[in-house]
Amino acid sequence: MKTLLEKCNTLSTDGLGYEAWLEKRKGSIGGSDAGSIMGLSAYGSPLTIYLEKKGLVSDREISRAAYRGKILEPVIFGLFAKDHPELAIEKAPYMFFSKTNPFMSANIDGLISGNATIDGKEISGTGILEIKTSKTGYGFGDDEIPDTHYAQVQHYLSVLDLPWAVISVYMLENEVIKNYVVMRNDDFIARLIAAEKDFWENFVQKDVMPAAMGLENEDDMITGMYEGSKAPVVLTNEEIDLCRTHKELGEQIDALRKQKDAVGINLKAKLGARTNGDGERKLSASGGGYSVSWSFYKRQSADSDALKKAGLFDLYCKTSECDRMTITKKKEVA
């Protein structure tokens, strides 16, 4: 630990509450931000991280899954230590900041020292222990971890200048713990630092909002940021270009959807003509590497008019807030 404290600038997290910790992490890029900044996450992007760092969205409440992980972390930590008595394992109650790249920080679950064989790999010296929980184990294979976790530990290895990390994952449904050794990847770290440096210097420090990637979380955050305006807004040239692109892409999607529907109808017509009329309204076909399943089913839905007449609609109706944006183009006068 002493060596790490000399390598990095540090901030003690002893007694630091969750809200205070969230505020502190706005001032740097942490390991959980790395995958989103590199475009490796299905839930986060440079835009979502920017909005959080700038305080433009309310601090995210700890999710049920994250809360569960926080509760189980000391248990998994203890089980790992019990399974590996040959290793010295200690907590690291600090935020570590890179002296070379001060915009990079690391909150690690623990430090490991010693020699052992884990996940079929030999480890020696000092490395990082990262604790995870997963309900189903999705993304964790025999020799595979989710991209976001890989980026996270490479970020930590960069900040702390360490050679390896162990990710210890508790799979809830199977009630098993799997350990993965992740070795330092300097080529990946070089790309990661370049992406994070660009993000920090050209977006966060310059107050420039990154372009969206089309994620649902991006839309939720942006929609939640703004209220309506009574006064009409005049579009800027950049916004006019976005309207034009949005409209053109919508037209292309509509055209492609019609083409796809037409192809599907033609396929149904050809397959339907070859059915033997045995009374079952289903068909399966295969060939050339493709398989087709065509069947009929009944779909049930509530009769909203009948419910309203019976006075039951409002009693069971759920109201939720949503947004809708429409873009129209004025017809050109000949």
Image (cartoon, rainbow, N blue to C red):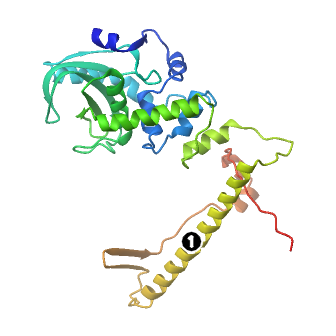
| Quadrant for the N terminus in the image | top left
Vertical side of 103 occupied by 144: above or below = below
| Quadrant for the C terminus in the image | bottom right
Residue located 76% across and 59% down the image: 309
Residue located 33% across and 14% down the image: 7
Vertical side of 247 occupied by 28: above or below = above
Measured as percent of width and height from the top left, residue 294 is found at 43, 76
Measured as percent of width and height from the top left, residue 164 is found at 24, 28
Vertical side of 333 occupied by 184: above or below = above
Residue located 58% across and 43% down the image: 218
Measured as percent of width and height from the top left, residue 267 is found at 46, 82
Judging by the rendered image, the residue that carries numbered circle 1 is 256
Report the front residue among 212 and 84: 212
Q: Is residue 312 left or right of residue 2?
A: right
Q: Quadrant of residue 149?
A: top left
Q: Is residue 289 left or right of residue 222?
A: left
Residue located 31% across and 38% down the image: 187
Q: Quadrant of residue 285?
A: bottom left
Asked if residue 65 shows in the view, the reply is no
Measured as percent of width and height from the top left, residue 324 is found at 70, 52
Q: Is residue 302 left or right of residue 201?
A: right
Q: In terms of secondary structure, where does tag 1 sit?
A: helix
Vertical side of 266 occupied by 172: above or below = above
| Residue type, numbered disc 1 | Leu
Report the front residue among 262 and 307: 262
Q: Decide: few, some or many residues near mark 1? Use Cα within 10 Å; few <14, some 14-19, many ≥20.
A: few
Asked if residue 237 shows in the view, the reply is yes
Report the front residue among 332 and 285: 332
